[in-house]
Amino acid sequence: MIIWYIFLGEILGMACNCNGVCTRYRAKRLDNGGRYSKGQKRCQRCEIFIKWEGLWCPCCNYRLRTKPRNSKYKIKFQEEIILNGM
Ligand SMILES: [Zn+2]
Ligand SMILES: [Zn+2]
């Protein structure tokens, strides 16, 4: 099923969007912000951190980010942590 989803995602490309499945895997907020080091991954399309073993989002099939790219992203993550904590 997951394989099929990846295959479908490859073909459809941008056609796949968040359908809410990712919320089932929503990762807990961490106070120190070290989410990637705790194995949490970021889906940029769903705009959510999830606890997921695969490299692809179980929801939208977008490639998950496993580490911050630069300091600009880190600031964004901090903001999100604050938002999620509300
Ligand atoms: Zn989603
Ligand atoms: Zn996603």
Image: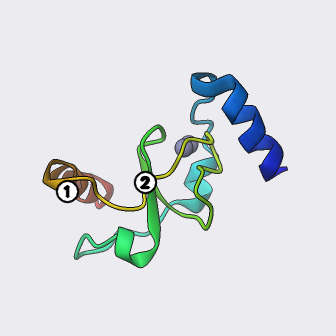
Please state the horizontal and vertical placement of residue 9, each as a whole percent of the image: 68, 34
Q: Secondary structure at mark 1?
A: helix
Please state the horizontal and vertical placement of residue 24, each as a whole percent of the image: 61, 57
Disc 2 marks a residue whose amino acid type is Arg
28 shown above or below 85: below
**Image colouring:** rainbow
Residue designated by label 1? 74
Image quadrant in which the C terminus is located:
bottom left
**Depth check: 15 or 79 in front?**
15
32 shown above or below 24: below
- Left or right: where does residue 67 sit relative to residue 80? right
Residue designated by label 2? 65
The 10 Å Cα crowd at callout 2, few under 14, some 14 to 19, many 20 or more, is some
When asked about the image quadrant of residue 14, the answer is top right
55 shown above or below 6: below
- Label 1 near label 2: C-beta < 8 Å? no
Residue at (42, 61) in percent of width and height: 66
The 10 Å Cα crowd at callout 1, few under 14, some 14 to 19, many 20 or more, is some
**Depth check: 50 or 10 in front?**
10
- Left or right: where does residue 58 sit relative to residue 79? right
Please state the horizontal and vertical placement of residue 35, each as a whole percent of the image: 35, 69
